[in-house]
Image (cartoon, helix red, strand yellow):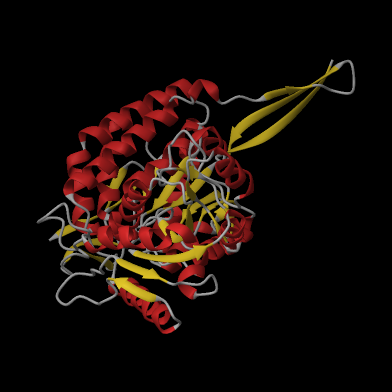
Amino acid sequence: MRLDRNFANGCFIDAASDELIAVTNPATEAVIAHVTGVTEAEAIAAVDAAAAAQKGWRKLPSAERAAYLHKLADALTECAPAIGAALALESGKSVADATNEAIYAGQITRYHAEWARRIEGEVIPSDTPDENLVLHREPIGVVACLIPFNYPVYTFMRKVAPALIAGNTVVVRPSNNTPTSAFEIARAVEKAGLPAGVVNILAMNHATAEALCTHPKVGMITLTGSVGAGRKVLEYCKANIAKPSLELGGKTPAIIEADADLEKAARDLVASKTTHCGQLCTAIERVYVQESVHDRFVALLKKHMSAVESGDRAEQPSLMGPLVNDASRQSIHGMVERAIAAGATLETGGKLPQGKGFFYPATLLSNCRQDMEIIQEETFGPIMPVVKYRTLDEALEMANDHQFGLSSVLYTENYRSAMKIANGIEAGELYVNRTPADPYQGFHAGWKRSGLGGDDGKHGMLEFTQTRLVVMKY
């Protein structure tokens, strides 16, 4: 059975403890690997190594840092089959999807490498005639990167690449559900020849994670995770006033106007909801349908949702894969049962399957209300609840009546409707006539409880910088 070691200060390290983290294939429930959990002393040593390496890394011309990132992008591409194989086993994704995720990780690494000559400061007019104000962009120092289980390879480089190009070093904690792919990335880091200590990758328990994140040399913590995890990170940040960057929960609303291409919208929404068993922070989580097309659209959703079959994607890649664990499945099923008890109509799905694997069927619920738990709380699974509306103003009010504000979707052929939602939606993103895909040159940032800061593009890269104002009298 596979046994992974942690990667710190440029090499794979032998375990100082006998703690082993078991990694389970969610499609079969078989333990497929063990990862050594680091001790608090090892986590602290990794932060110290990152802090020491950062002194030299930040002094490199940004073009030289970019050259390293291009080498890392090349290595990720070359290692994509190995990374993908590990990811497929630990996540239940198909090998093709998992390998593509590694390729996309290389692409976003290359994208951020190209910011090297574009990290700009400002010259600001002074009120004094013999004075210049110059604002510099500087690295923060050591960044702790906390990676989620759902897209652990892409999110790894989504955080690490901009941190590195800005002159920071990183200590990465992968999810304990999906750590083996992270150690395949470590081999790509080794292959690319990055200086020792610039990238450190450690598996650990929660107590050790707290020691890592509250280390006084950690200047920033970036997390993709739940609201509860975000609150915990904010507590960690308080210890040393570290900078937080948080991408948290989502409850993406999709508004379907009467003039929409209903067939396209139905296919798109079902694909969004069933990709990786709905375990995407921007997957469609609630659907608002104009009353004149409601019954027709629900029938289309039911047709496409009913056609989705679940199973082991290692055997049949076209199937919908599993949830991350049984706790997630039981939580989702409980939400579905409570929605039905509260008056929702089960159109398809909603039954716990028999046999091995953490599978749950694509589930469609109609006759939902805005006050239902299934509308208000994130499911993070293949559940699609539908609410009927009369006017676009009513739909916008319900879409905004929520704790989350990460992404949103509108299907319409009317530009006035599009502009109304674009100017009124309380979310960091709006996708018109398509479902979310997080272009890495954009800016993926949530409103409300969906987070602080954001990822991707120029603004995501600048998250990993701080400013220094130089006032020059002459």
Above or below residue 51? Residue 256 is below
Depth check: give the residue in front, 290 or 441: 290
> Between residues 27 and 157, which one lies in front from this camera angle?
27
Asked if residue 290 shows in the view, the reply is no
Horizontal side of residue 240 vs 147, given as left or right: right
The percent position of residue 452, horizontal first and vertical second, equals 59, 52
| In this rendering, position of residue 315 left or right of residue 205 | left
Point out residue 366 in the picture as x, y percentages from the top left corner: 40, 70
User: Can you give x and y, in whole percent of width and height, for residue 54 in the image?
Assistant: 49, 37
Residue under the image location 60 percent in, 63 percent down: 401
Name the one closer to the observer, 363 or 57. Answer: 363
Residue 382 visible in the picture: yes
| Residue found at x 48% / y 68% | 375
Where residue 302 sits in the image (x, y, percent)? 29, 63
Instruction: Tell me the quarter of the picture where residue 391 sits.
Output: bottom right
> Does 290 sit above or below residue 344?
above
- Where is the C terminus found, in terms of image quarters? top right
Q: Residue at x 52, y 45 (%)?
A: 430
**Residue at the right extreme, as displayed:** 128
User: Taking 16 as reference, is 371 left or right?
Assistant: right
Callout count: 0
Compare residues 58 and 75 and report the one nearer the observer: 75
Q: Residue at x 33, y 63 (%)?
A: 382
Outermost residue on the bottom side: it is: 341
Q: Residue furthest front?
A: 292
Q: Quadrant of residue 108?
A: top left
- The image quadrant that residue 113 belongs to is top left
Quadrant where the N terminus is found in the figure: bottom left
